[in-house]
Amino acid sequence: MSDLILTPNFDNADDFYATLLAAHEGLEKADSDALNARLVLVLANHIGDGTVLSDAILAASLSND
């Protein structure tokens, strides 16, 4: 894999999770799915490295927890 970081790497994970849950609160399933899709695209644009993004897709598809 490239420079993909798979270990915890940000501060205040609980705050992030709470913010993410709050953004989804009250949304219908389709709207929640659309929010997730937009978030993925915004973050992918921020990362901007195709190799890292491909590795992230692979890592996410292999994790079935």
Image (tube, rainbow, N blue to C red):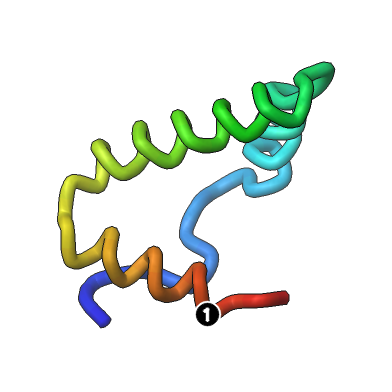
In the picture as drawn, the residue positioned furthest to the top comes out as 26
Residue 58 screen position, x and y as percent: 39, 74
Q: Residue at x 24, y 71 (%)?
A: 3
The correct choice, above or below, for 8 with respect to 42 in the image is below
Q: Residue at x 76, y 20 (%)?
A: 27
Q: Residue at x 31, y 44 (%)?
A: 44
Residue 50 screen position, x and y as percent: 17, 58
Q: Quadrant of the C terminus?
A: bottom right
Q: Residue at x 28, y 59 (%)?
A: 53
Viewer-side residue, 24 vs 32: 32
Specify the quadrant of the image occupied by residue 28: top right
In the picture as drawn, the residue positioned furthest to the right comes out as 26
* Image-based side of 4 in relation to 26, left or right: left
Name the element at disc 1: helix
Residue 22 screen position, x and y as percent: 75, 24
Say what amino acid the circle numbered 1 marks.
Leu
* Image-based side of 65 in relation to 9, left or right: right
According to the picture, the residue beneath numbered tag 1 turns out to be 62
The correct choice, above or below, for 65 with respect to 39 in the image is below
Specify the quadrant of the image occupied by residue 38: top left
